[in-house]
Image (cartoon, grey):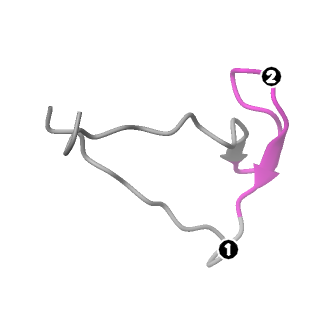
Amino acid sequence: MKGEFSRWEPICHHRVTADGRPGPSGDGGFAAEPGRYQLYVSYDYS
């Protein structure tokens, strides 16, 4: 439908953790580093 919001499937299922260990899903993690990651948010008002 025209104008309908369509959300993409998540591309990355890995988590950023303090020490780089995997998150609850068991997928590999990335170590938290200041200034390295950016968070993008999209609200769905449907």
- As measured in the structure, the alpha-carbon distance from the residue carrying label 1 to the one carrying label 2 is 22 Å
Residue type pointed to by label 2: Gly
Q: State which quadrant residue 29 falls in.
A: top right
What secondary structure prevails in the magenta region? Answer: loop
Q: State which quadrant residue 37 falls in.
A: bottom right
Q: In the rendered view, does 43 fall on the left or right side of 39?
A: left
Residue 19 can be seen in this image: no
- For label 1, count other residues whose C-alpha is less than 10 Å away and answer few (under 14), some (14-19) or many (20+): few
> Which residue is under mark 2?
26
The residue under the point 71% across, 69% down is 33
Label tally: 2
Q: Nearer the viewer, residue 17 or 36?
A: 36
Q: Secondary structure at mark 2?
A: loop
- For label 2, count other residues whose C-alpha is less than 10 Å away and answer few (under 14), some (14-19) or many (20+): few
Q: Nearer the viewer, residue 35 or 38?
A: 38
Residue type pointed to by label 1: Arg
The residue under the point 67% across, 74% down is 36
- In the rendered view, tell whether residue 33 sits above or below residue 1: below
Q: In the rendered view, does 22 fall on the left or right side of 5?
A: right
Q: Nearer the viewer, residue 19 or 13?
A: 13
> Which residue is under mark 1?
36
Residue 5 image point, x, y percent: 28, 40
Q: In the rendered view, does 45 fall on the left or right side of 14?
A: left
- The span shown in magenta is 17-32
Residue 33 can be seen in this image: yes
Q: Quadrant of the C terminus?
A: top left
Residue 39 image point, x, y percent: 48, 61
Q: Is residue 23 magenta?
A: yes
Please tell me which of labels 1 and 2 falls first in the chain: 2
